[in-house]
Image (cartoon, rainbow, N blue to C red):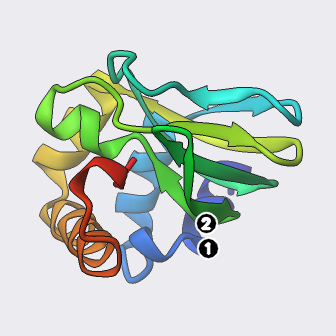
Amino acid sequence: MSTNVEVLRTVPLFQGMSDRSIETIAGLAFETEFPEGATLVREGDPGDRFLIIRNGSAVVDQGGRTVRHLRGGDFVGEISLIDGSPRSATVTATAPVEALCIDRDGFTRLMDEFPAIRHDLLNALTQRVRTNPDPGTLD
């Protein structure tokens, strides 16, 4: 079993999925690392990837204001990939980050082939809106 499969099994977004589905998703992902202080995504940039944090921590800032803290199992980058708009926030590593990355094509495939993930992503976005109704601070 690959390490990526094991990591994906711990991410709430993917829990309850079949072994085959997890393996397919793991095949779309590649590992990447960011040192402390590195920018994972930058506000205003085009969205080109979806990141799932394996280890480490990061902070989400929008317009210079901190709106969320991230840790292992959290994900970022889905909004720009869903709506095609520029990134709505900057995410900066507050400790070294190990992440799984799925590029735009892989993310599109994920949304097309796994309706349960599409549904869970929409639920996660809804929860962000409910807890922080300023739509500019979502990520």
Residue name at image x 34 percent, y 80 percent: 131
Who is closer to the viewer here, 120 or 83? 83
Question: Residue 68: x percent and y percent?
Answer: 56, 63
**Residue 64 in which image quadrant:** top right
Q: Which residue is mark 2?
A: 73
Whether residue 19 is visible to the viewer of this picture, yes or no, is yes
Dot 1: few (<14), some (14–19), or many (≥20) neighbours within 10 Å?
Answer: few
Who is closer to the viewer here, 75 or 131? 131
**Residue 123 in which image quadrant:** bottom left
Which disc is residue 10 wearing?
1
Residues tagged 1 and 2 counted as in contact (Cβ below 8 A): yes
Instruction: Name the amino acid, label 2.
Output: Gly
Question: Residue 107: x percent and y percent?
Answer: 29, 36
Question: Residue 115: x percent and y percent?
Answer: 12, 62
Task: Report the quarter where the N terminus lies.
Answer: bottom right
Question: The residue tagged with tag 2: helix, strand or loop?
Answer: loop
Residue name at image x 47 percent, y 47 percent: 76
Q: Nearer the viewer, mark 1 or mark 2?
A: 2
| Most distant residue in the front direction | 64
Whether residue 2 is visible to the viewer of this picture, yes or no, is no
Q: In this image, 22 relative to 87: left or right?
A: right
Residue name at image x 79 percent, y 43 percent: 97
Dot 2: few (<14), some (14–19), or many (≥20) neighbours within 10 Å?
Answer: many
In primary-sequence order, the first of circles 1 and 2 is 1
Who is closer to the viewer here, 51 or 110? 51
Residue name at image x 40 percent, y 47 percent: 139
Question: Residue 6: x percent and y percent?
Answer: 67, 63
Number of numbered markers:
2
**Residue 5 in which image quadrant:** bottom right
Query: What's the distance in space between the residues labelled 1 and 2, CA to CA?
Result: 7 Å
Instruction: Name the amino acid, label 1.
Output: Thr
Q: In this image, 127 relative to 1: left or right?
A: left
